[in-house]
Image: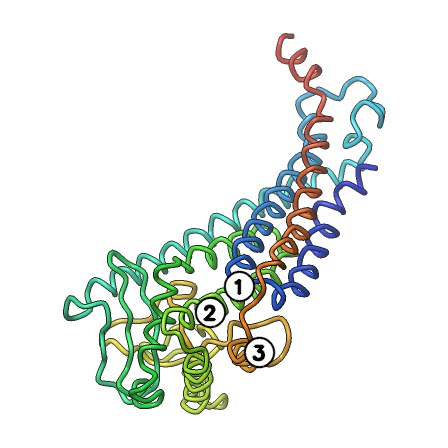
Amino acid sequence: MAVDQLLVSLVLAPAAGAVACRILVDLLPPKAAVLGFTAAAGLFATAGTLSLFVFGMPAVAGIAGILDEPVTAASWPAASLPRWLSWTCLLLGAVAVLSAMVTGRSQRGSVHAARREASALPGGTEIVVLPDGRADAFALPGLPGRIVVTEGMLTAVGAGRQQALFAHERAHLTGRHHLFAFAARLAAAALPTLRPMVTLVDYAIERWADEQAAEDVGDRHSVAHVVGTAALAATAQAVPATEDVSDAPGHPAPGRGGRRRGPLLPGRTRAARPAKLRAGAPGRGPRPGPVPRRVAALLAAPQRRKRLMLVALPAALAAASCGVAVEALMDLPYRRVFDAGDS
């Protein structure tokens, strides 16, 4: 029974949740998908980490002398696990916490770097146009946030569709989308089973920005054109795969899309994702061709709100995972711990 609980919290429930989200990502309104998937990922990660520590407690109890007396599976199911498995759970729980802390520090650093970059940009307007022939546009979270766009991108999308481009990037800022990407990565760092959820949240974030931009400008076709044009321009100017620029000055680690490019702002390197979000970013959807799917969604009618109830499926799976973890937590022999402390 104890092994079954462990498998449910660590593998079965998160994997089922990822599959459910994969199916639902194109059926749900994007905002609901982002909120629901991020919350589910957080619950899965919390339940999984808690389960690891709970099932690692017999190893700690053995050292503390709490298990001097025989323990039955009925009185404490976790104690029926082999001792080596309890130690493994305890070690994996510590690794999960450490991994989440390292990821959290890295993501916070990327956000702070983006905010410093935003505050250092010239001028006091929301939109900053850089004299660069490369096609690029991205949002920098900050106080206030800034939208950075190159002259090459403005030329690529054309004068009539620039407002759609700005609306997409502004949607990233007003929706604080980098925080959802941050949370998904934090959950996946603690529980690697959730790594597919990062891809799904990224894709849903881009769809959210697409839909918000379409609503703001009142023209879904213009936003679809911008998304496709930005993606094509980014692909055309990508560094050839045979050219090794990993050690070249000013070339950060691959960002969205896995491409390496020099910094648009002299003397600055780009902050790691998820601090910067781009209109032409593929969103790394669950199936091949995320950009064409985004364009197709924009050319179709908006998602029906009647489907909002579908987000309850990953939420239910996450709740089940939490229930298993809480059940294991309630099974801990608290009376023995208190008796050992009194003695």
Q: Tag 1: Cα neighbours inside 10 Å, few (<14), some, or many (≥20)?
A: many
Q: Residue at x 54, y 57 (%)?
A: 32
Q: Residue at x 44, y 68 (%)?
A: 209
Q: Residue at x 60, y 47 (%)?
A: 45
315 on left or right of 76: left
299 on left or right of 143: right
The residue at which mark 3 appears reads as 293
Q: Is residue 265 above or below residue 124?
A: below
The residue at which mark 1 appears reads as 30
Q: Is residue 97 above or below residue 295?
A: above
- Label 1: which secondary element: helix
Name the disc covering residue 110, or none.
none
Q: Identify which residue, 313 or 105, lies in the foreground.
A: 313
Q: Are marks 3 and 1 in contact (CB under 8 Å)?
A: no
285 on left or right of 216: right
Whichever of callouts 1 and 2 sits on the residue coming sooner in the sequence is 1
C-alpha distance separating marks 3 and 2: 13 Å
Q: Identify which residue, 269 or 222, lies in the foreground.
A: 222
129 on left or right of 322: left
Q: Are marks 1 and 2 in contact (CB under 8 Å)?
A: yes
Quadrant of residue 26 within the rendered picture: bottom right
Name the disc covering residue 211, or none.
2
Give the residue type that dot 3 points to.
Answer: Arg
- Label 3: which secondary element: helix
Give the residue type that dot 1 points to.
Answer: Pro
Q: Position of residue 96 (x, y in %)?
A: 58, 47
- Quarter the N terminus occupies: top right
Q: Position of residue 241 (x, y in %)?
A: 50, 88
Quadrant of residue 19 within the rendered picture: bottom right
C-alpha distance separating marks 3 and 1: 13 Å
Q: Identify which residue, 243 or 9, lies in the foreground.
A: 9
